[in-house]
Amino acid sequence: MTDPRHPPVGSVALGGAAPGGEERVLAERSIATLKTLAMDAVEKARSGHPGTPMALAPLAYALWTRVMSYSAAHPRWPDRDRFVLSCGHASMLLYGALHLSGYALSLEAIRAFRQWHSPAAGHPELGATEGVETTTGPLGQGLGNAVGMALAERMLAERFNRPGHVVVDHRTWAIASDGDLMEGVSAEAASLAGHLGLARLCVFYDDNRITIDGRTDLSFSEDVGARFRAYGWNVLHVPLDAPWSAYAEAAEQARGAEAPTLVVCRTRIAPGAPTKEDTSEAHGAPLGEAEIRGAKRSLGWPEDAQFLVPPEVLAHMGAAGARGAARVSDWETRLAAYRAAFPLEAHELERALEGRLPAGWEAHLPTFAAGQKLATRQASGKTLNALAAVIPELVGGSADLAGSNNTAIAGASDVQRGRYGGRILHFGVREHAMGAVLNGMALHGGWRVFGATFLIFSDYMKPAIRLAALMELPVVYIFTHDSIGVGEDGPTHQPIEQLAGLRAIPGLCVLRPADASETAEAWRVALERRGPTALVLTRQALAVLERARHAPEGSAHTGVSPAALAPAAGLRRGGYVLRESAGARLTLLATGSEVELALAAADLLASRGTPARVVSLPSWDLFSALSAAERTAVLGPGTTRIAVEAAASLGWERWVGDGGACVTLDRFGASAPAARLFQELGFTAEHVAQTARAALTARAALGPASRGTDLLG
Ligand SMILES: Cc1ncc(C[n+]2csc(CCOP(=O)(O)OP(=O)(O)O)c2C)c(N)n1
């Protein structure tokens, strides 16, 4: 039976409708379509989250038809508003809205929700679906991304807009759930957004008071609105059972605010589901047929229909999605006028938005004279400054360790509330937010971003690093104080397992340069790459290697001359022979500060009649990309390999192979001066030489058969 409040779907029956009735009917039907698509898709997939998309359908309707500036046909229009669904588990809300408003997301894709290769993936994935601005799912991260996007917009506007020529002028809208706001990363990001006064950011908080385990009062009883007010946000409220227009009105108020806005929206999860409404059962599992029938009945929807999209809904929401095309052409006209008035700026804007670096930037990479001593963090600081002078879009900062991380840019000013023209970001002691905000800035476009902290605290930003890798965002991480070389601060500050953890992230390029020259090369790699890069740098000074001295004999294995092998440019291949030695049966593999040590050990071994090769292996991932033959040539076929790295041994077996040995650290460090720590923990030339000799002897004792195993050959 049809609910008399709802005319039959499939046609807009206007007879008897009050003034404005057509609009009302279309809105109700659009919202019902969003709700039923979510129920049906989750049911068909037999997995997913139906309740929250149902509850937020009126909000989505308001955003996509009345609030956001976008054009479905131009999903990459640079001046579009950004939308972030921070609670990515509610992905069906986004997919429904994208489909109905005319993005290239078909109903077929929605029918295949959560299936292999469907653009309607379990959680929204950047690159899989037009209109998805960021990959979300790990709660809290999306809110951090939204802060980064809002910051990137203000900074870009400050850099490029001119009186009478506004070419950067958009907003960031986000939806966050209880889980998002329970997570610490969102607190850090919101605190930063409040501090910076990012008034073009508006977050709708779905205050449905339900999470997986039950009602939020099990664990979450603070006044979220008061918390955000304390961060300096403008806080609005939308009451329970509010119509879609209440969200549009809140958005309108947010536009006038001088601070970021949080709209606390009281909602009921799975509204209309007969028994599961307002319960955690509606959070993350299919509702089941009876509940869906009941919910459809309450909407006046045909109970038997699945994936029903009434044509008038498609036309109505599609018209909203198409309206933005006029905005795009208006923007293009404005951009043309801007180009005429400010040709250089326009060229720079387009270049930055396309992510192209200025021509010839590499020529500005510094060179370092052999023999001088400086920490790789200092070399990084010098390289950063040289590059910043020619790459104006290179911006970033540190989580309160700028001096230690060497991230200051001479002459650059700080980014602060109302002063978005600077280049230096002060993240405060907020590594979690730093990671998520950097991702948001990279997603927004127009900037090449870097963020810095001690390597030990990379753990505090690991979720964001992982997402940067998943999204292939070109973020540069500057991680200094990379080993027990930290010294007196002790084991809390001395990284051990961090390198292994970072190296395990697919798509993250981890670079641990051996000296200043490799550090400059590492920056080159970082800026040329598509995905994120971690620069792992020393606190302590290292000699700039005298490369000519170390490659006197050429490589019998590769046939490449020593001159071609020794330059720091070898870093680009991930690993290269730093010191060749005719007839050597030993290869010492080292990274970062331990390369110097490996060279000293090789000197010692040579003086005792055991020649040894030395390989600098700054990046395992770049090295892995070489062919097996190229790798073996570098590692030395048939040689016994010794790994030397002041970090966990995990993973080194891959390069060392059978019969080799590791001078590594499978224990925590200690509080003492660095020199003493290296000595006590086995990082001396003598210990490396002894370990190498012992491995060689043990292998020889086993006879020729033991030499047959070469993992990489
Ligand atoms: C960092 C993180 N921890 C845990 C999860 C698993 N998870 C997904 S949804 C959810 C409950 C979230 O409840 P809420 O945010 O209120 O969403 P709603 O029930 O309103 O849909 C949890 C714990 C996650 N996605 N991310």
Image (cartoon, rainbow, N blue to C red):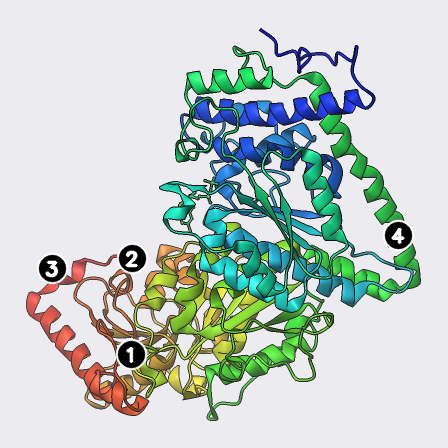
Of mark 3 and mark 4, the one earlier in the sequence is 4
Q: Does the CB distance between marks 2 and 3 fall below 8 Å?
A: no
Q: Which residue is mark 2?
A: 712
Q: Which residue is mark 4?
A: 334
Three-letter code for the amino acid on which mark 1 is drawn: Pro
Of mark 2 and mark 4, the one earlier in the sequence is 4
Q: Position of residue 209 (x, y in %)?
A: 47, 43
Mark pair 3, 4: CA separation: 74 Å
The answer to whether mark 2 is within 8 Å of ligand 1 is no
Mark pair 2, 4: CA separation: 58 Å
Q: Residues within 10 Å of mark 4 (few under 14, many from 20)?
A: some
Q: Which residue is mark 1?
A: 491
Furthest toward the top, the residue is 1
Q: Does the CB distance between marks 2 and 4 fall below 8 Å?
A: no
The answer to whether mark 1 is within 8 Å of ligand 1 is no
Which mark lies nearer to you, 2 or 4? 4
Q: Position of residue 593 (x, y in %)?
A: 37, 81
Q: Is residue 32 left or right of residue 550?
A: right
Mark pair 2, 3: CA separation: 17 Å
Mark pair 2, 1: CA separation: 35 Å
Identify the image quadrant of residue 674.
Answer: bottom left
Q: Position of residue 162 (x, y in %)?
A: 87, 64
Q: Which residue is mark 3?
A: 705
Mark pair 1, 3: CA separation: 42 Å
Three-letter code for the amino acid on which mark 4 is drawn: Arg
